[in-house]
Image (spheres, helix red, strand yellow):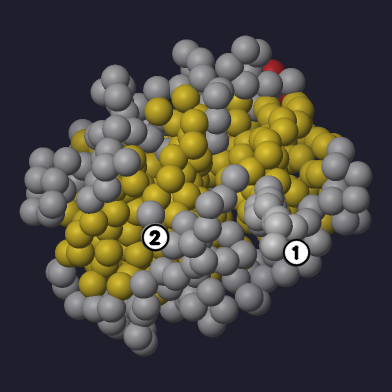
Amino acid sequence: MHLVRYARRGRPWRSLVLGVVLVLCCAASAQQWSWSSEFVDASGTFSALAVDPDGNVHIGYLSPDGGGTKYGFRSADTGRWFTMFVGKNNGPVNLALDSHQQPHLCYLSFQTLKYASWDRKKGWQIQEIGPNSGERDYLCGIAIGPDGAPHVTWYQLTYFADAYYVHIRHAVLKDGAWRASTVDYGNETGKWNSVQVDAKGDVHVSYSAYKEGALRYARSNPDGSSWKVITIEDGKSGHNVGATPGMGNSMVLDKNGQPNFSYRDETTLRYAWPEGDHWRIDIVDPNANPFGNQSWINQRTSLALDANGCPHIAYETDGNLKHAWWDGSRWHIQAMGIAGANHRYPSIAISKDNTIYIAYSAPEDGSLRVLVGKLEQPKPAATSNHK
């Protein structure tokens, strides 16, 4: 597979990512999985998966035929899926778990932004974030801090003086009120966005700067009041001048609390992580958009790290569901044999025993399904009794 690696040196970023950062290191091995498919719901798109420490699987999603946002749960003990309705919705959904493994959802409903949390006694508690503050559209991100506070990011559309101003916003729920701030005032920042909170409570956000053609990363203190922004890759001056990197970005924090990113430009799937004093950027799939179809939906990527710290990316190429992973020395791409005219809306999560879960919308009927990949154990080498 064609692979290009390069490292861009730009603005100093040690104030954002502290300490000595080593190359992503995980044990190289010939990995193979045995895959099975599980039925979740009769309709489902915009899925978001999470696996808790006990191996239970959680999923938030939009069910077009089910009236809106829904939540699904799969017990590690039974392997059966149970689903429930959360709230009316017509847009994307995202999911995060708190330290008690309770689900929290953000979703974009008819250009409003909603937050839902599960209360064992009261059921789903739903709030609107920033009512009457303009249109909210495209994607939202959600993460739960170590103090239990939810953090939400979104793409804000504000109409003023006969023009739209669109930028990425962040809010955190503190003392019963949402405290909101603008992460980046640049125009068309945050159509694709992702948020994580580290063990110290610091907030990490990745997002697209579409007008500028860049992937950007911002970090703030726990209340989101002091954002520091850097550019990870700039399509105007980087390796692939004229491209628009940053689309479909997904971010996770590794075991050292450092950010890792999957994202796309018009043609390629890319991966970035800190290496020494710069960002290392790999072209994972040089032909991730073979027919040149441009849609904010099909550009989405979903990223997870396995128990060894190796990245896995779920994405689609013109309706084909694919799984890419790094084995410690090179990238591999696996076509999952699921293709169709519509979008697959994939998301990925990995359990601590390295079972992979990839949610997708089935091409034949639009049902929501989850691929379950069990890591196959290598066969022992043949032995001989010949002396």
Q: Is residue 233 something that shows in the picture?
A: yes
In three-dimensional space, the C-alpha distance between marks 2 and 1, rounded to whole angstroms, equals 28 Å
Indicate the position of residue 29 as horizontal and vertical percent values: 52, 58
Depth check: give the residue in front, 78 or 153. 78
In the image: residue 86, left or right of residue 251: right
Picture quarter containing residue 289? top left
Q: Closer to the observer: label 2 or label 1?
A: 2
The kind of residue on which mark 1 rests is: Pro
Few, some or many residues within 10 Å of mark 2 (<14, 14–19, 20+): few
Per the image, the residue denoted by label 1 is 53
Q: Tell me which numbered mark, 2 or 1, is placed earlier along the sequence.
A: 1
> Which residue corresponds to the image point at 72% horizontal and 33% vertical from the top-left?
36
Q: Quadrant of residue 274?
A: bottom left
The residue pinned by badge 2 equals 329
Asked which secondary structure carries label 1, the reply is loop
Specify whether 191 is left or right of 37: left
Q: Is residue 359 above or below residue 3?
A: above
Q: Is residue 119 above or below residue 374?
A: below
Q: Which residue is found at the position 26% from the left and 34% from the top?
A: 267
List the single residue furthest toward the bottom: 19
